[in-house]
Image: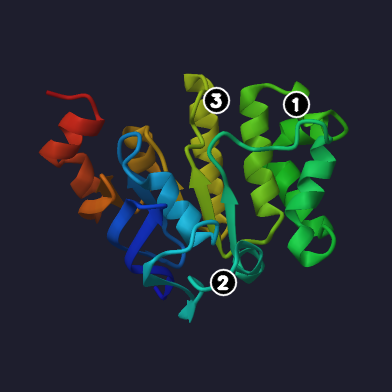
Amino acid sequence: MPTMLEVQDVSAYYGNIQALKNVTLHVDQGEIVTLIGSNGAGKSTTLKTISGLLRPRTGSIKLKGEVISDKPAHVVAGLGIAQSPEGRRIFNRMTVMENLELGAYSHGKPDPVDLERVLTLFPRLRERIGQKAGTMSGGEQQMLAIGRALMAKPTVLLLDEPSLGLSPILIDAIFNIIKEINAQGTTVLLVEQNALKALDVANRGYVIQTGNIVLTGTAKELLGNDMVRKAYLGEE
């Protein structure tokens, strides 16, 4: 399969603090690839750098072979990368529908086909379409954050900690929806602390520690790796 997203030797900084150190990874068309690691390892920074919110100091990022690492975030979004951020970042005072409409902003106006797809994936959003987003439960807000990203017609969907703060039942539901989104043709790069769930849905994975990619392999290989099992799956 062709490579959709390629990150090559990317280093990124917050001021004088280096957050990413020559990070290299790729996501092929139709894959779910996961990036796992502990808090502060550089997972969210990787996604921010891909989406243009943080400019890499060295290295390059390509989407379908085109360099995007020199482009601002709104241009990157228009080219086909959409992110559902950690903490959801929905607009609390706006309705569900208004949040979804904002997701389609780069295309001018919402596509009814995209809206129907999102509401089919997330029936709860259809039920709450006119409700203020801030009055919904955490799980419903996470559904809205992912749905809003899908309204941008992404070629690659970046998901940052979609299970954070959710109950086990809702976590299962969210990951089932991620598999369905992928089955419908959207390529996914998933950042997730719940390594077991992430590797259960992913084709391949990368492990990041203190800004360095330290391990890569198929999901099955990583699930069987002693270091991964001890550090991220809670096994002795």
**Which residue is pictured at 81% across the width and 50% down the height?**
101
Secondary structure under badge 2? loop
Secondary-structure class at tag 3: helix
Q: Which mark is residue 134?
A: 1
The residue indicated by pointer 2 is 71
Identify residue type, mark 2. Lys
Indicate the position of residue 150 as horizontal and vertical percent values: 66, 53
Above or below — where is 88 with respect to 3?
A: above
Kindly state the secondary structure of the residue where label 1 is placed: helix
Q: Amino acid at mark 3?
A: Leu
Q: Quadrant of the C terminus?
A: top left
CA distance for labels 3 and 2? 36 Å
Q: Residue at x 26, y 45 (%)?
A: 210
Question: Total marks drawn?
Answer: 3
Q: Which residue is mark 3?
A: 170
Earlier-in-chain disc, 3 versus 2:
2
Front one among 78 and 197:
78
Q: At x 69% / y 37%, what residue is drawn?
A: 90
Q: CA distance from mark 1 to mark 3?
A: 18 Å
In the rendered structure, the answer to whether residue 39 lies left or right of residue 75 reads: left
